Image: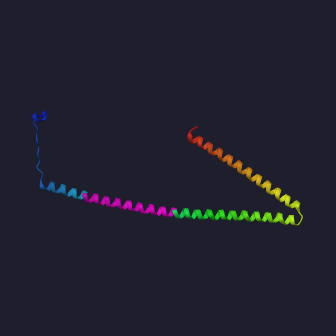
């Protein structure tokens, strides 16, 4: 099994390496290893700092979300309290006017409440319809239609 490359003469040039060159190569390799070790330790420190920052950011987010939920609960509780107090006051005025035989006042209060509720419901419906129209326009512009 002769190979075609066996017949080609190959010039072998061997340079002898002096001891200074060998010691320089070894020294360079040891410096490279030291630098690589330093790079690894720096990368570990960066990773540890990133981990600590992420943990602190998550803790801050948890605290922020808890505070936001507490505040929303506080607002809802106050709204419900105010609405309940207002309803109790209106019902009390209506009952007192009926007790004092002032049906006209009770009827006018009930009419005013009906008009206010109708206006509120109508306004809410119009606002909701306009908001939905904006959302449809935004979706169409995003889709490129």
The quarter of the displayed image where residue 52 is located: bottom left
The region drawn magenta spans 33-61
Indicate left or right for 136 with 104 as reference: left
Q: Residue 11 in the image: x percent, y percent?
A: 10, 39
Residue 88 vs 141, above or below: the answer is: below
**Residue, x 41% and y 61% (percent of image)?**
51
Q: Nearer the viewer, residue 138 or 32?
A: 138
Q: Nearer the viewer, residue 43 or 16?
A: 43
Q: Residue 22 in the image: x percent, y percent?
A: 15, 55
Indicate left or right for 83 with 94 as reference: left
Colouring convention used in this rendered image of the protein: rainbow
Q: Point out the image quarter for the C terminus.
A: top right
Residue 6 vs 75, above or below: the answer is: above
The quarter of the displayed image where residue 84 is located: bottom right
Residue 45 vs 8, above or below: the answer is: below
Q: Point out the image quarter for the N terminus.
A: top left
Q: Nearer the viewer, residue 91 or 66?
A: 91
The quarter of the displayed image where residue 67 is located: bottom right
In the rendered image, residue 53 lying in the magenta stretch gets the answer: yes
Q: Residue 140 in the image: x percent, y percent?
A: 59, 40
**Residue, x 78% and y 65% (percent of image)?**
89
**Residue, x 40% and y 62% (percent of image)?**
49
Q: Residue 72 in the image: x percent, y percent?
A: 62, 62
**Residue, x 11% and y 46% (percent of image)?**
14
**Outermost residue toward the right in this view:** 101
Tally of numbered discs:
0
In the rendered image, residue 93 lying in the magenta stretch gets the answer: no
- Give the overall secondary structure of the magenta segment: helix
Q: Nearer the viewer, residue 60 or 35?
A: 60
Indicate left or right for 96 with 57 as reference: right
């Amino acid at each position: 099994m002769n190979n075609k490359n066996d017949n080609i003469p190959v010039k072998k040039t061997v340079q002898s390496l002096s001891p200074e060159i060998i010691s320089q190569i070894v020294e360079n390799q040891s410096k490279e290893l030291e630098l690589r070790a330093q790079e690894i330790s720096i990368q570990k420190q960066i990773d540890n700092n990133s981990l600590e920052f992420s943990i602190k950011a998550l803790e801050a987010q948890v605290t922020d979300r808890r505070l936001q939920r507490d505040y929303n609960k506080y607002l809802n509780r106050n709204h419900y309290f105010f609405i309940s107090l207002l309803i109790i006051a209106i019902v009390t005025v209506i009952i007192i006017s009926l007790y004092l035989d002032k049906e006209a006042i009770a009827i006018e209060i009930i009419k005013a409440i009906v008009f206010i509720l109708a206006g509120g419901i109508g306004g809410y419906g119009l606002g909701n319809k306009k908001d939905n129209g904006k959302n449809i326009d935004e979706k169409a512009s995003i889709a490129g239609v």
